[in-house]
Image (cartoon, helix red, strand yellow):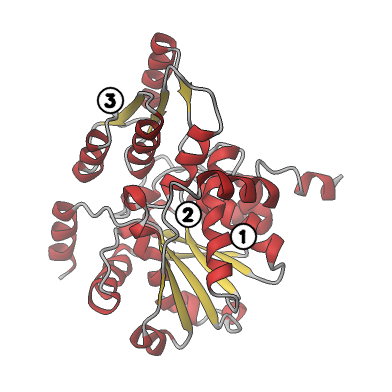
Amino acid sequence: MEAKKRHEYAADLSSIKEAHERIKPYIHKTPVLTSESLNSISGRSLFFKCECFQKGGAFKFRGACNAVLSLDAAKGVVTHSSGNHAAALSLAAKMQGIPAYIVVPKGAPKCKVDNVIRYGGKVIWSEATMSSREEVASRVLHETGSVLIHPYNDGRIISGQGTVALELLEQIQEIDTIIVPISGGGLISGVALAAKSIKPSIRIIAAEPKGADDAAQSKVAGRIITLPVTNTVADGLRASLGDLTWPVVRDMVDGVVVVEDGEIIEAMRMCYEMLKVSVEPSGAIGLAAVLSTSFRSNPCWKDCKNIGIVLSGGNVDLGVLWDSLKSSE
């Protein structure tokens, strides 16, 4: 029974490969960058998968594109999102000539709302609470007859995000570990399902901010833990795990490294200075994790030598960044 349960996931290697064939004409095959300076600092060989160069500025376009291309949604699509999924779905819908209704909570990063508008998404505001987001999205669904595309708790989304791992392991075959930001779990679920099917010995490690460490708590508890509030500069990592992503995280993620906001900001600075890449806080957290004391001092990770790090997005809210830099000085 346990063996059966462990394999009933929302996606698998087959669905991820199908997604890759479906979206390949539309996405960027993002480059992998290296830095001898960062290798020296970390004591490992680091390979940065630059999803910050993806269309829409983040990996989210992969899943959104796969979802839109997988369904008949002539009346459009709807989602609730404060970040990169909103822009990605707007762009994917625009490519297909259908409307995208985006429920955006008040206080969402301006740069990400601007991206939604730039890509033709129709912004409908909600309150910042999840209940308000879901209530408004439900109303929009009823009024428009559109199709709901959840930001992460959807097999089509998970399959699309898993294409990151297909590319990365093709580009750098010697990778023995992949570090992935975790929030709702769509990206890390897809990456884990693809990578462990291709290379069973590979380690998948989640990187998470201290102010939103529900995944770390969930792994310890053996069930989904939802935090009443989150507080982190990594605005893209504030969601909770879903019932489709949690089983994969539970079974296939080898550990969670929790870092402070100050470490994330320092990792962003290193990305600017050494990789010459603009990375948002959520995207820089993988580098922060590999440089953290908790990772370096953990004997479980001493054999992690060739590490893939997913730079998940590059949509930086500069106003928030400058304020964070000032407060950390």
**What residue appears at the point 57 percent right and 57 percent down from the top-left corner?**
191
Q: N-terminal of the two: label 2 or label 3?
A: 3
Q: Quadrant of the rendered structure where residue 304 is?
A: bottom right
Q: Residues within 10 Å of mark 2 (few under 14, many from 20)?
A: many
Q: Is residue 135 above or below residue 107?
A: above
Amino acid type assigned to the residue bearing label 3 in the image:
Lys
Q: Which residue is mark 3?
A: 122
Disc number at residue 182?
2
**What residue appears at the point 40 percent right and 19 percent down from the top-left corner?**
135
Q: Which residue is mark 1?
A: 253
Q: N-terminal of the two: label 2 or label 1?
A: 2
In 3D space, how far apart are the residues under numbered discs 2 and 1 (Cα atoms)?
10 Å
**What residue appears at the point 29 percent right and 72 percent down from the top-left corner?**
271
Q: Is residue 86 above or below residue 222?
A: above
Labels 2, 3: front one? 3
In 3D space, how far apart are the residues under numbered discs 1 and 3 (Cα atoms)?
36 Å
Q: Is residue 41 above or below residue 230?
A: below
Q: Secondary structure at mark 1?
A: loop
